[in-house]
Image (cartoon, rainbow, N blue to C red):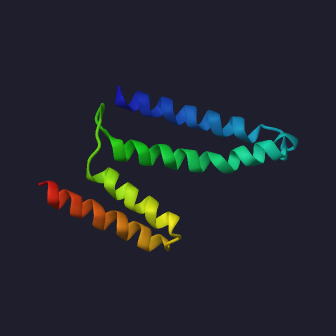
Amino acid sequence: MIWAAVLLLAAGCYAVKLLGLSVPAAALERPLVRKLAALVPIATLSALIALQTFAEGRTLVVDARAAGLAAAAVALLLRAPFLVVVAAAVVVTAAVRALTG
């Protein structure tokens, strides 16, 4: 049963890739399509971050991870380097977890 699902998903991924390759080049050169294509990775990453930060199973959770995300957002607003942003998120998350038990 699991292998059937894996094979079905692999075939679906291949079909989507084939569909993308069959789009005419003229359609991909439009400014709106270029702008939307540039935003897809950002939206996908944002959704992944939100899911990993605020979800635990099927429940909504606000815990130390939210504080770490807030610290990272502040560091980004202050235009900190990437490693500083990550370090701020890690330190704040660890501190909140240590304080809350």
Q: Is residue 42 above or below residue 24?
A: below
Give the image location of residue 50, x and y in percent: 42, 44
Residue furthest to the left = 101
Q: Residue, x 33% and y 50% (percent of image)?
A: 66
- From the viewer's perspective, tell me whether residue 54 is left or right of residue 12: left
Locate the C terminus by quadrant: bottom left
Q: In the rendered view, does 98 fall on the left or right side of 61?
A: left
| Image location of residue 78, percent across then percent down | 50, 69
Residue 54 position within the rendered picture, expressed as x and y whole percent measured from the top left: 34, 42
Residue name at image x 35 percent, y 30 percent:
2
Q: Nearer the viewer, residue 30 or 61?
A: 61
Looking at the image, which residue sits at the far right?
26
From what the image shows, is residue 13 above or below residue 83?
above
Image quadrant where residue 40 sits: top right
Q: Nearer the viewer, residue 26 or 14?
A: 26
Q: Is residue 8 left or right of residue 101?
A: right
Q: Residue at x 31, y 65 (%)?
A: 90
Q: Quadrant of the N terminus?
A: top left
> Would you identify the image quadrant in which residue 17 lies?
top right
| Quarter of the view holding residue 4 | top left
Q: Residue at x 45, y 59 (%)?
A: 73
Residue 19 at what x, y percent from top left? 70, 35
Residue in the foreground of this view, choosing between 81 and 10: 81
Total marks placed = 0
